[in-house]
């Protein structure tokens, strides 16, 4: 596992505080846990701090620790263990997370990484000159069937080519990232086959007509009651002429 440390002091802000809205959310989140167990809220509070400032600062770690009555080192352990927490300043407009695991790598993730190196910075976790963009390579993001893909904040962009990624980077750098449609970037619906459906290809109307015809046929057929779990009346064991110890005793009486 790679060593993760806090950013240098020269880039750390002097203080941190939740906004009014986030402070109310944090209080409500803490109240979900029993008294004395409020430390269970440490991960959601750190995530909210990251969403507010873009990364987890030393001041934010201390602030969350004070809210939860935890030792600073305990919150620091959580922040440095989980890679979802950014410990360095990231791009103010986009932080590009390129999936580099096997499915994406086989489908061209290395070319996407090269685009990030060329258009943003040669090294991950470094911002471009204007400070608007940064990038990193991450593990699986769960969209393997639409590989290769990237994540920017909470949105995924899938089925990418290097040219498409360059276009996405340009839009975010220009402050127009909201104009880029998330999800697959090719003509497919969600995770359906890229070349179109290979089954269930009949038109919807024809499918409905067939379903109605089958339903009509089913209604016209008389279905006898089920005899499941009932003993067969023609079985030897149920033949009234079959002698058993009980019938022998009855005849003797």
Image: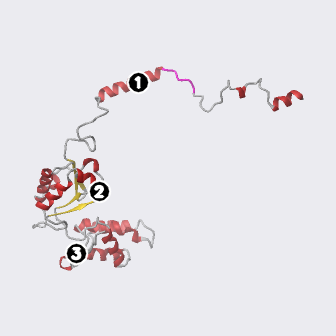
The residue indicated by pointer 2 is: 140
Q: Secondary structure at mark 1?
A: helix
Mark 1 Cα shell of 10 Å, populated few (<14), some (14-19), many (≥20): few
**What residue is rendered at 27% in x and 71% in y?**
18
Q: Which residues are magenta?
A: 221-225
Mark closer to the chain start, 3 or 2? 3
Tag of residue 7? 3
Residue 120 rendering spot, x and y as whole percentages: 13, 62
**What residue is rendered at 32% in x and 67% in y?**
82
Figure quadrant of residue 48: bottom left
Chosen colour scheme: secondary structure
Mark 3 Cα shell of 10 Å, populated few (<14), some (14-19), many (≥20): some
**What residue is rendered at 27% in x and 56% in y?**
101
Magenta region's main secondary structure? loop
* 221 over 124 or under it: above or below: above
Q: Secondary structure at mark 2?
A: loop
Tag of residue 214? 1
Residue 43 rendering spot, x and y as whole percentages: 34, 67
224 part of magenta stretch = yes
Q: Left or right: 244 with respect to 223?
A: right
Q: CA distance from mark 2 to mark 1?
A: 45 Å
Quadrant where the image shows the C terminus? top right
Q: Of residues 7 and 39, which is closer to you in this image?
A: 7
Q: CA distance from mark 3 to mark 2?
A: 25 Å
Tag of residue 29? none
Q: CA distance from mark 1 to mark 3?
A: 67 Å
Q: Secondary structure at mark 3?
A: loop
């Amino acid at each position: 596992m790679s060593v993760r440390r806090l950013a240098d002091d020269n880039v750390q802000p002097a203080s941190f505080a939740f906004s009014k809205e986030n402070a109310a959310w944090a209080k409500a989140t803490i109240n979900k846990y029993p008294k004395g167990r409020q430390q269970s809220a440490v991960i959601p509070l750190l995530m909210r701090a990251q969403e507010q400032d873009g990364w987890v600062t030393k001041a934010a770690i201390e602030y969350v620790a004070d809210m939860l009555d935890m030792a600073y080192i305990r919150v620091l352990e959580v922040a440095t263990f989980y890679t979802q927490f950014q410990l360095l300043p990231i791009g103010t407009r986009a932080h590009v997370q390129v999936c580099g695991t096997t499915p994406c790598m086989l489908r061209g993730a290395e070319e996407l990484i090269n685009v990030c190196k060329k258009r943003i910075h040669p090294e991950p976790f470094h911002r471009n000159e204007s400070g608007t963009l940064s990038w990193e390579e991450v593990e699986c993001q769960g969209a393997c069937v639409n590989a290769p893909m990237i994540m920017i904040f909470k949105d995924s962009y899938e089925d990418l080519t290097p040219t498409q990624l360059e276009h996405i980077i340009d839009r975010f750098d220009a402050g127009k990232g909201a104009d880029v449609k998330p999800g697959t970037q090719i003509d497919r619906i969600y995770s359906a086959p890229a070349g179109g459906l290979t089954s269930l290809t009949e038109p919807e109307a024809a499918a409905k007509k067939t379903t109605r015809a089958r339903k009509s046929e089913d209604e016209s057929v008389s279905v006898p009651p089920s005899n499941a779990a009932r003993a067969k009346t023609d079985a030897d064991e149920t033949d009234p002429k079959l002698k058993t110890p009980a019938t022998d005793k009855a005849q003797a009486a």
